[in-house]
Amino acid sequence: MEVSSFRHGVASGDPTTERVVIWTRVTGARGDEPVRWWMSRDPQREDVVAEGDAIARTEDDFTVHIDVGGLEPDTVYYYGFARDDEHSPPVGNVIEMEIDAEGKAQVDA
């Protein structure tokens, strides 16, 4: 039985009005693993606003944390990760950055 590389899912946190941290843990890695990440305005990834490569390192328990900047407030973003040809599911991984009355970013994820 094949195990998903992203069995632990994906998450986001530490939002500001223009950035957020996204992260995941790679399941089944035996050593450092290259991982691709992306953030888009749509779940089909036709309007990608940021993307890049990272390494899920053994010493970090195969977790990847990406501080994504250049985002716009009051905008819905979808994000995900890929390892080889396997992608984490973008559905349900939505960030909506809003500004509260005190000027702090709030995220609906």
Image (cartoon, rainbow, N blue to C red):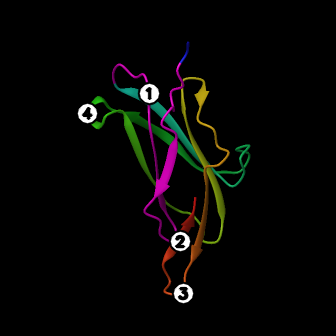
Query: What element does badge 3 sit on?
Result: loop
Residue 59, which numbered label? 4
Disc 2, disc 1: CB below 8 Å? no
Residue type indicated by callout 3? Ala
Separation (CA) of disc 4 from disc 3: 40 Å
Residue 74, which numbered label? none
Disc 3, disc 1: CB below 8 Å? no
Query: What element does badge 1 sit on?
Result: loop
- Looking at the figure, which quarter contains the C terminus? bottom right
Q: State whether residue 3 is above or below residue 98.
A: above
Residue 87, located in which quarter of the rendered image?
A: top right
Separation (CA) of disc 3 from disc 1: 40 Å
- In magenta segment, residue 9: yes
Residue 106, which numbered label? 2
Disc 2, disc 4: CB below 8 Å? no
Query: What element does badge 4 sit on?
Result: helix
State how many labels appear: 4
* Image coordinates for residue 23, horizontal then vertical, percent: 45, 46
- The earlier-in-sequence mark between 2 and 4 is 4
Separation (CA) of disc 2 from disc 3: 10 Å
> Circle 4: is it few (<14), some (14-19), or many (20+) Cα within 10 Å?
few
Residue drawn 35% across the image and 26% down it: 32
Majority secondary structure in the magenta region:
loop
Q: State whether residue 35 is above or below residue 10.
A: above
Query: What element does badge 2 sit on?
Result: strand
Disc 1, disc 4: CB below 8 Å? no
Residue type indicated by callout 4? Glu
- In magenta segment, residue 41: no
Residue position for label 1 = 27
